[in-house]
């Protein structure tokens, strides 16, 4: 099979599509604000908007940089372009990318894995937008007719999803998964009790960023150790 | 015109349709190219169809959660803006916080006070300005991080695989631990009983999710039931969610 197609054809084109759609997305996201200003003549006062922007940026600003870095090893280059334009990354894009890779039986981090993740994320975007479009057209009044029981049960969907996915992907490396859940638990206890309050906004981003890189460090160390042991063994048998 | 009439007007729907369409167009373009590249790199059509199906099944549950989160936005900033904001960038949590920050800068509390024209504009502009940082940084860095990762691993594909699968474990451990730690933190900080009970229920749901998934995966492997491994995540989530809600 032609391996160079991926490097010389697919990736350059994906980068071009990603950059154009990404920056176009930034511009187009102002559309409703412009219509509000031009059609209805409603504009916010610059001073008030600046205040709101500064408080928003201090709450989320670190996430703009930390999230793309934390999630890159999972979703890859095209996955990064898509996930950050469409949003809902941890609750939808990453689960879908990972489940797609599992269903196609490809390894994450390979060319095949990245292609499958891209297909998975694309499907999830189409479904997510379709569901939201139906919901928005039906309107709040119809949606509010959902029984209370259903709506409160939905609060427990994401915790169940994350627990199930940790097991699904941890079963291949069960010791690493068990160590990571203990580390992550201790870390979130410390964050929740305010031990890291001296770092601005730490409660928002410190947990995921640390867990991803600690897990990578453990995984790489284990793999290197295994390689060393295998080498030593093969020398002995010689 | 009343503020909410403006927020739900036809021009607003049209304006919001542009960014939403772009998100779909991007997904379709990447999908088409990935499919073509898949054929070139030796993926079978069955594998790719299986991947698409599995992702479709996986995305339904979280989509409904996002939909129920959209309810509060529909009421406060109108249907078109709520629809657009949750179809691109951001997340449910981010959008409601950002909208609240915007309106409170001019003294309007989102959800309780009546929305004024200016409060609507403040909410909208704040949500947009505070979200584009993600797209700008991710779009600039996507291919550069790829180069960096290759440099760090010196092009070893085995290491790239180890990094990716370790990162997945790290992400889900982090997301699960966030729920697991909540009730303990609430107990130490003596938060109200109702909040603490809710956080215990999330823990129960998360642990049930892990346990049921473990059992189903084992059964599917032992019996060689392919259909079960395809549906195990959906079955697990539904069962964990319903059991937790009934407790």
Image: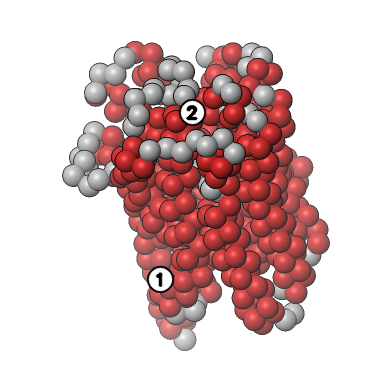
Q: Residue A53, percent across and down?
A: 36, 43
Q: Return the chain for callout 1.
A: A
Q: Residues within 10 Å of mark 1 (few under 14, many from 20)?
A: few
Q: Is residue A128 above or below residue B75?
A: below
Nearest the viewer among A188 and B12 is: B12
Q: Are marks 1 and 2 on the same chain?
A: no
Q: Which quadrant of the figure contains the N terminus of chain B?
A: top right
SS type, badge 2: helix
**Tag 2 residue:** B117
Q: Return the chain for callout 2.
A: B
Q: Residue at x 56, y 21 (%)?
A: B2
In this rendering, would B226 be left or right of A65? right
Q: Residue B217, percent across and down?
A: 63, 42
**Tag 1 residue:** A224
Q: Is residue B97 above or below residue A231?
A: above
Q: Residue B247, percent across and down?
A: 52, 14
Name the colour scheme.
secondary structure
SS type, badge 1: helix
């Amino acid at each position: 099979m032609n391996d160079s197609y991926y490097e010389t054809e697919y990736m350059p084109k994906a980068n071009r599509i990603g950059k154009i759609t990404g920056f176009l997305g930034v511009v187009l996201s102002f559309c409703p604000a412009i219509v509000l200003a031009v059609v209805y003549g409603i504009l916010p006062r610059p001073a008030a908007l600046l205040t709101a922007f500064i408080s928003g940026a201090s709450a989320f600003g670190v996430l703009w940089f930390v999230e793309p870095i934390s999630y890159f090893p999972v979703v890859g280059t095209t996955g990064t372009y898509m996930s950050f334009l469409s949003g809902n990354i941890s609750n939808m894009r990453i689960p879908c990318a990972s489940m797609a890779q599992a269903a196609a039986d490809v390894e994450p981090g390979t060319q095949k894995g990245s292609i499958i993740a891209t297909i998975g994320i694309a499907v999830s975007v189409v479904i997510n937008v379709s569901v939201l479009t139906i919901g928005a057209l039906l309107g709040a009044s119809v949606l509010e007719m959902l029984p209370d029981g259903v709506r409160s049960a939905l609060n427990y969907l994401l915790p169940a999803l994350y627990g199930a996915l940790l097991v699904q992907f941890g079963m291949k490396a069960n010791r690493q998964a068990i160590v990571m859940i203990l580390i992550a638990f201790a870390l979130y206890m410390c964050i929740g009790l305010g031990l890291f309050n001296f770092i601005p906004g730490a409660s928002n981003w410190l947990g995921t960023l640390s867990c991803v890189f600690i897990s990578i460090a453990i995984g790489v160390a284990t793999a290197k150790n295994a390689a060393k042991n295998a080498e030593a063994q093969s020398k002995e048998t010689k | 015109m009343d503020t909410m009439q403006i927020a739900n007007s036809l021009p607003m729907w049209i304006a919001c349709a542009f960014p939403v369409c772009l998100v779909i167009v991007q997904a379709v373009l990447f999908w088409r190219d990935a499919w073509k590249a898949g054929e070139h790199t030796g993926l079978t059509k069955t594998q790719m169809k299986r991947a698409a199906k599995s992702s479709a099944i996986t995305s339904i549950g979280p989509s409904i959660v996002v939909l129920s989160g959209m309810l509060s936005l529909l009421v406060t900033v109108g249907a078109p803006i709520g629809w657009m904001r949750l179809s691109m960038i951001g997340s449910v949590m981010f959008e409601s916080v950002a909208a609240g920050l915007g309106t409170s800068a001019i003294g309007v509390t989102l959800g309780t006070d009546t929305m004024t024209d200016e409060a609507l504009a403040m909410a909208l502009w704040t949500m947009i300005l505070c979200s584009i940082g993600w797209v700008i940084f991710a779009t600039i860095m996507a291919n550069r991080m790829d180069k960096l990762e290759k440099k760090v691993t010196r092009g070893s594909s085995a290491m790239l695989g180890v990094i990716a699968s370790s990162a997945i474990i790290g992400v889900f451990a982090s997301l699960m631990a966030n729920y697991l730690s909540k009730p303990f933190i609430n107990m130490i900080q003596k938060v109200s009983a109702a909040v603490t009970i809710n956080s215990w229920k999330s823990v129960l749901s998360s642990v049930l999710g892990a346990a049921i998934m473990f059992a189903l995966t084992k059964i599917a492997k032992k019996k060689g039931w392919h259909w079960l491994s395809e549906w195990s995540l959906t079955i697990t989530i539904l069962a964990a969610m319903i059991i937790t809600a009934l407790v």
